Image: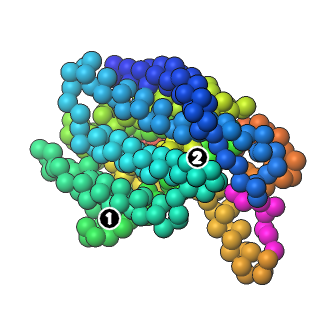
Amino acid sequence: MISILLAGAVSMVLTLLGTRLAINLLSRRGYGQLIRDDGPTSHHTKRGTPTMGGAVFIIATIVGYFAAKLFTMTTPTASAVLVLFLFAGMGAVGFLDDFIKIFRQRSLGLRSKAKLAGQTLVAVAFAVLALQFPDERGQRPASPFISFIRDISWLHLVPVLVVIWVLLLIAGMSNGVNLADGLDGLATGASMMVFGAYTLICIWQFNQSCATSPGAKCYEVRDPRDLAVVAAALTGALFGFLWWNASPAKIFMGDTGSLSLGGALAGMGIMTRTELLVLLLGGLFVIITASVILQVGYFKLTKGKRLFRMAPLHHHFEMLGWEQVNVVIRFWIISGLCVATGLGLFYAEWVAT
């Protein structure tokens, strides 16, 4: 428990202080956000706000995790290191995208194919490595089964299909968080709730682990306690970042932050054997992604008509006249309900087993 608390505290302090330094540095160098002309007109006032702030909480999370391991004199586990690898790798793809936007002074960075190629490379490397490193009980970081709250015994996949499934999950979650990152604090607050939930889930899985408490209700997860340390570090880092990212935002996370957070969410779902549950815990990101898919599909089917005034969904409510702060708070409430429902189902499954 000490390592979990320490990781969260260190990452939060580092982000609180580091983000202030990043704002000053990025402002001096002119690394400001470019605003798309086809977006809500109210967003034009945000032009020039420092971006790439996600780099701060990526560094803070990694330092927080390893500081906790150093303090407690424990060895990092394969599961935790792989989640951090996915987190940082997706962040690197986003950083390249953000840097191109700033360097070339355009609102679009990497071409879609190049961006997808980068995400695919990181996700496939993560998937392949996650199927390695068995512990003394033969448990590997990732499972060949599709999981909900535990592995679903009749949904066994061969290794190639496991890689494809992991790739789809990572791409979906990373792009979902990316789409949600359109209003001050929206993606930060929602992600913070999900990682907070995963901290609780991992602690519970550790207390009921098959490695220490074998039985009908135990959880076959390789490194639940160390995954709780990672989740706590992520939660703390986002707490610190939200201080500066809340409306009016002094800095944006950029694709650096949104892609990394989506990757980490998917990574936590894969490592904790809760791959389908993460879609409920991160339900807000699923809803926002679905709104874009529906908008595009409806536009094509009706030859030019729109289902929403603007997609993603949060911009639709802006166009209806809602204040940005109201949209963010109400979407946070939706995210909180999704997280509460997911945690409720997780606990109910244990009680009912």
Q: Which mark is residue 102?
A: 2
- Secondary structure character of the magenta stretch overall: loop
Image-quadrant location for residue 308: bottom right
Residue stretch rendered in magenta on the structure? 305-313
- What whole-number distance in Å separates the C-alpha atoms at marks 1 and 2? 34 Å
How far across and down, in percent of the image, does residue 11 sit? 44, 25
How far across and down, in percent of the image, does residue 67 sit? 31, 23
The residue located at (30%, 28%) in the rendering is 66
Callout 1 amino acid = Val
Callout 2 amino acid = Ile
213 left or right of 251? left
How far across and down, in percent of the image, does residue 288 sit? 65, 56
Image-quadrant location for residue 211: top left
Secondary structure of the residue carrying numbered label 2: helix
59 left or right of 173? left
Image-quadrant location for residue 179: bottom right
Say whether marks 1 and 2 touch (CB < 8 Å): no
Residue with the mark numbered 1: 163
The residue located at (68%, 62%) in the rendering is 291
Q: Residue furthest right?
A: 321
Tell me if residue 162 comes above or below residue 187 in the rendering. Answer: below
* Residue 245 seen in this snapshot: no
Q: Is residue 72 magenta?
A: no
